[in-house]
Image: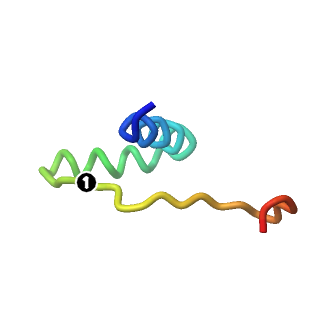
Amino acid sequence: MNLEKVFKRLWIDYTSQNPSVQKTYNIFKNEGEEVLNDHIAFRTYDEPHIE
C-alpha cells in the first residue's frame, strides 16, 4: 500500500467518525480554496502498553 492510499484511508475513517469535518472541507473547496492536510496526530489515552 502506498502512502497516498494510507492517507486516503485515514481521511475516510476520520470523516466517517466526524462528519462535520467533511462539511467544513467541502465549504472551503466550494469557495475555491486548496485544502492540504499538514499533519496526522495519533493519540492514545491511558494505554498501559504505550509509554
Q: Nearer the viewer, residue 11 or 29?
A: 11
Relative image position of residue 12 (x, y in whole percent): 47, 36
Q: Which corner quadrant of the image does residue 44 belong to?
A: bottom right
Which residue appears at 84% of the width and 59% of the height? 49
Image quadrant occupied by the C terminus:
bottom right
Q: Residue furthest right?
A: 48
Secondary structure category for the residue under label 1? loop
Q: How is the image coloured?
A: rainbow
Which residue appears at 40% of the width and 35% of the height? 2
Which residue appears at 12% of the width and 50% of the height? 32
Q: Residues within 10 Å of mark 1 (few under 14, many from 20)?
A: few
Q: Which corner quadrant of the image does residue 47 belong to?
A: bottom right
Q: Nearer the viewer, residue 19 or 34?
A: 34
Left or right: residue 21 versus residue 43 is left
Relative image position of residue 43 (x, y in whole percent): 65, 61
Q: Nearer the viewer, residue 47 or 32?
A: 47
Disc 1 marks which amino acid? Val
State the count of labels: 1
Relative image position of residue 34 (x, y in whole percent): 18, 53
Q: Residue furthest top?
A: 1
Q: Which residue is mark 1?
A: 35
Relative image position of residue 23 (x, y in whole percent): 37, 45
Left or right: residue 47 versus residue 33 is right
Q: Is residue 38 above or below residue 6?
A: below
Which residue appears at 28% of the width and 55% of the height? 36
